[in-house]
Amino acid sequence: MKIQLPEPFVQKMKQLLDDEFDRFIASYDDERVYGLRVNELKIKAAEWQQQTEIREHLQPIPWCPTAFYYTEEDRPGKHPHYHAGLYYIQEPSAMVPVELLDVQPGHRVLDLCAAPGGKSTQIASKLQGHGVLVSNDIAAERAKALVKNIELAGVRNAVVLNEHPANIAKAFSGWFDRILIDAPCSGEGMFRKNPAMVEEWQAYSVERCSSMQREILEEIAPMLAPGGRLVYSTCTFSPEENEEQIARFLARHPDFSVVSIQPQWGWGSGQPSWISKETKEQLSEQQWQSLAGTIRIWPHRSKGEGHFVAVLMRAGDAYMPPQSWEERRKMRISWPSAIKQERVSAKAKRSIGAAKGIKPLELDLQTVWESFSDENVELTSGEQVRAILFGSRVYLQPFELPSLEGLKVVRAGWLIGELKHHKFVPFHPLAMGLKPDEAARTISFASTDELLLRYLKGETIFVDDALIQRKAGVKKNGYVLICVDQYPVGFGKYLDGMIKNELPAGWRLI
């Protein structure tokens, strides 16, 4: 076997799997599989598949209609389309939880343990800019990766927090239509993908993870609206972290029930018989049997790593987002021509958690923004938002979002720029969230163009003025949206044939 598995783990799996154990162990000698998911905020999956250079190697991932298997040699993370946020590289089984979350445009969604952001960007793609996504991670360093991936995907309607679940619950009681808990776990399902996880398994015991998971489930339950859906997932095989967790939760929360998942594509059913006798005694017969409606993804049965997924629903009438955009516009007003201003309370200014230096919006913000947007961008799609000023930084925030006062906020919304010397200076996330027709000036390069590669490395580039596409009446010089095959990768500042590079250092090719 290529991987040296811990002996206690091997013995436990032998006891659980019985006749399937040999096939399970043999799967560790199989090559790992690679997957990517197309970001439909930017491009439809079928369109991307037709135009990508690796299309001949792609195979559909059956449980995610926007995703494909690719080969290790394809290296899609090196392609300029990756820097345009057209797709996210993700382990195939990890796509299942969001598919089962049943997110619809207009939903309010919480991704509780969100870093590095794969599932959050998958949720955002399903929201299509309508509704609210709150992405949280309790680890500050991991939250940085989460922010970058959300910005790369061009998400406009997300807020990123770095908080403990109990604190989030105080601000969002009964508020979310959908909650995803991709719980911290012992990681047994990732041994093949990442052998280093074997060492972590020794350090992070099943018992320790189980305790954290119980606490998370308890703190998250009050945030789900009646009729809402909660998906709990792990990347481990341990029954203590899977069926046992769900069983204990059901015993404490009779207003929640399991939504049965039909096993397919080689998935296995959850195993009610694997929970403890003590926990079983706390359940009704129906609750105990319902655990079979959870799913297990096994590496010897499916093309993916090991996962467990449970779908729970809270009793009550669910909020149903309107099905037509016309109906939706009646409920949620489109953006006004001028950004709405909102003063932040003095108490909020003093709040430690709501980032450092929240200030009321300066009176000239609207004027400064309009001066910039008249010459550079026109935001034509989305829902009503409010402008929030954190220090000098300007965010556009979903209008329906409750107060974030007292919370540790990493991103208060779509970070579009900052006020500097009474001027508006755009930031990179604005560029990534724009559609090309929302920019006053654009220039698009082929993915193989040397000028594009030089731009992605952070260099100043020189171009023929005829390559700049401008809207009618727009001045010659100003901010230009740099694109690859018509998809934004960042801003430049154009002046008479020269494009000054505005790509942040952390986004450049090395």
Image (cartoon, rainbow, N blue to C red):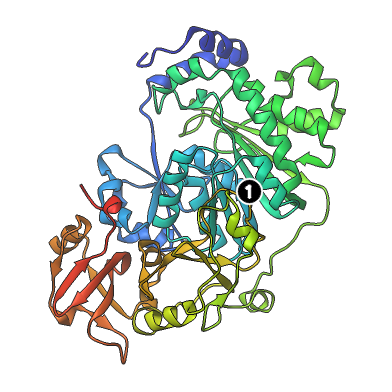
**Residue at figure coordinates x 76%, y 45% from the top left:** 222
Q: Where 302 falls versus 57 (above or below)?
A: above
Q: Position of residue 221 (x, y in %)?
A: 74, 42
Whether residue 148 appears in this view of the structure is yes
Question: With 171 as the anchor, is 317 left or right in this view?
Answer: right
Foreground pick, 283 / 170: 170
**Residue designated by label 1:** 101
Question: With 207 as the anchor, is 490 left or right in this view?
Answer: left
**Residue at figure coordinates x 66%, y 24% from the top left:** 211
- Image quarter of residue 175: bottom right
Whether residue 60 appears in this view of the structure is no
The amino acid type of the residue labelled 1 equals Leu
Q: Position of residue 396 (x, y in %)?
A: 51, 67
**Image quadrant containing the N terminus:** top left
Q: Position of residue 32 (x, y in %)?
A: 38, 30
* Element type where label 1 sits in the image: helix
